[in-house]
Image (cartoon, rainbow, N blue to C red):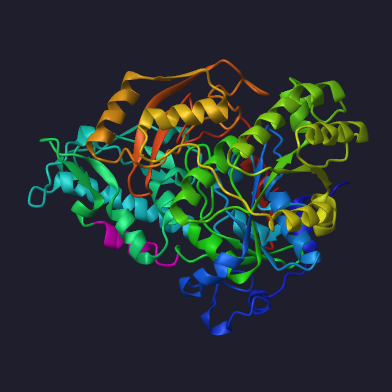
Amino acid sequence: MMKTDLEIAREYKMLHIRDVAANLNLPKEIVEYYGKYKAKLPLSLIDEEKIKSSKLVLVTAITPTPAGEGKTTISIGLSQALNKIGEKSIVVLREPSLGPVFGMKGGATGGGHAQVVPMEDINLHFTGDFAAIEKANNLLSAIIDNNIQNKKNNLGLDPRTIRWARVMDMNDRSLRHVIIGLGGISNGVPREGGFKITPASEIMAILCMCKSIKDLKERLGNIFVGYTYDKKPIFARDLKANGAMAALLKDAIKPNLVQTTEGTPAIIHGGPFANIAQGTNTIIATKMGLTLSDIVVTEAGFGADLGAEKFIDIKCRKSGLRPNAIVLVATIRALRYHGEVGVKETGNENLEAVKKGIENLEKHIENIKQFGITPIIAINKFANDSQEEIDYIKKYCDSLGVKAFTCEVWANGGEGAIELANEVKKAVQEKTEINFIYDNDETIEGKVNKIASKLYGAKKVEFSSKASSDIKKINELGLSNLPICMAKTQKSISDDPNLRGWPKDFTFKVREVEISSGAGFIVPISGEIMLMPGLPEIPSSENIDIDDDGNIIGLF
């Protein structure tokens, strides 16, 4: 019987985190220990000069399927492989959200012999970063409602214009739309409100975009709250909230140091979803990795149409970071799925379905080339993949001018990605020039049109009357020059989750547009994307338990 990820993780004898830090030549007195196997690193370690000489590898994927494509597993395995061939590499990842852990996806720490550990801690509360983000977000919510209630210090906020939502890190559809302030005068002013999941919070986005505590406070102050009755915009700084919010984030801003199942250092920090936020770890964490190693392997959430686009058009644009190579992960079972095979049949050999579904891979290759980099394809191999299917994919990729490599990191750890690591080692030495999909000074509509047409393949874009009204308000606030952070389904390149493969000639519909002025981007929302997910009919939580000795069971 095949071992679970949790069983494999527990077989690994972890190094004490002080030894992991020592291997990075970090003085033990500056490392902040969270028990034996976790630590936080101070921002003072970041060295901008060292960053310039280090190389950055972005791992992305084709359009995800219900089975998952193993992007995090490949990222971890690749970093392990780079160390095996003599390179000094760190993997830098996002923190998992409790929503998916207890929902459908399960854990998010890699798999098999390519995991970050301790996987139970990382998948559950870790070092408390998500809790701090949640508290900072909800502190602003409390201050907003207190200001409406308080006649002495009232700014005249019109409750009907407030878009700021409370957050919690759990899938709970019942909290999407709520009425608050019921129960009489002493309980506040009744108004409509709602909850988002914590990874969708603007505080999460701000943490991932900030470069320092000073920058953090400024961004928190720039959060747009709503309008007064006389149409004056109100920001968090007007409520004098940003200082206290930043104080709650004083430890959360520091990157977390852990290790992989082969002792490779791993930095895990920040966790925005890529379908509703920017989908990448913090700028601070990436810079920390580049300071402490020569090659950083990092990943961006979901498919290249979401995570990779936002990594380049938002994170790279604002941070000055640039990927030296991009790895595009594909699985044969996903290509079968995009070839219109049912979920239960994706584990069966089906060359014809692969031939039909490979157009999804082709579109993502085309998209990455638009950024100025030719991707390297990592075929995340499963036991039921036939050699005929693998050979077909490699030959097809070759016809497109890209190289594809079979990876078996789940079963073999770093050894399963040696070929890929050698190719990446060569690729990062080549000079690259990144292209952005749009310019900041274009109109909001123009930027959305470029993303939808160039990357998604949309024939046209339709803005609802609500979206057009939202855009008008953003223009009036003088914030139209911010980059775009598209919120759309991750299940399709289009805005329709039912369209597999490479959808063509569709209309991309924008239903509303939000402003994340603190994070520094504009969020067009399309389709039925939810900022607070719900649990599936049979959630992963049904399998999770704790035994009498305190051991977590059922995490995958």
Q: Residue 320 colored magenta? A: no
Q: Residue 243 colored magenta? A: yes
Q: How far from the left and from the top, in percent, is residue 209?
A: 44, 54
Q: Residue furthest left?
A: 152
Q: How far from the left and from the top, in percent, is residue 202?
A: 39, 47
Residue 190 can be seen, yes or no: no
Q: Nearer the viewer, residue 502 or 511?
A: 502
Seen at 34% across and 40% down, the residue is 481
Residue 103 can be seen, yes or no: yes
Q: Nearer the viewer, residue 24 or 475?
A: 475
Compared to 301, does 339 lie above or below? Answer: above
In the picture, measured across the screen, residue 554 lies left or right of residue 273, that is: right
Seen at 86% across and 28% down, the residue is 348
Seen at 73% across and 50% down, the residue is 74
Q: Nearer the viewer, residue 88 or 160?
A: 88
SS assignment for the magenta stretch, majority:
helix
Look at the image and give the residue range highlighted in magenta.
Answer: 241-251
Q: How far from the left and from the top, in percent, is residue 377?
A: 75, 42
**Number of marks in picture:** 0
Q: How far from the left and from the top, in percent, is residue 248?
A: 36, 62
Q: Quadrant of residue 503?
A: top right
Q: Quadrant of residue 390?
A: top right
Q: Nearer the viewer, residue 364 or 226?
A: 364
In the picture, measured across the screen, residue 108 lies left or right of residue 335, that is: left
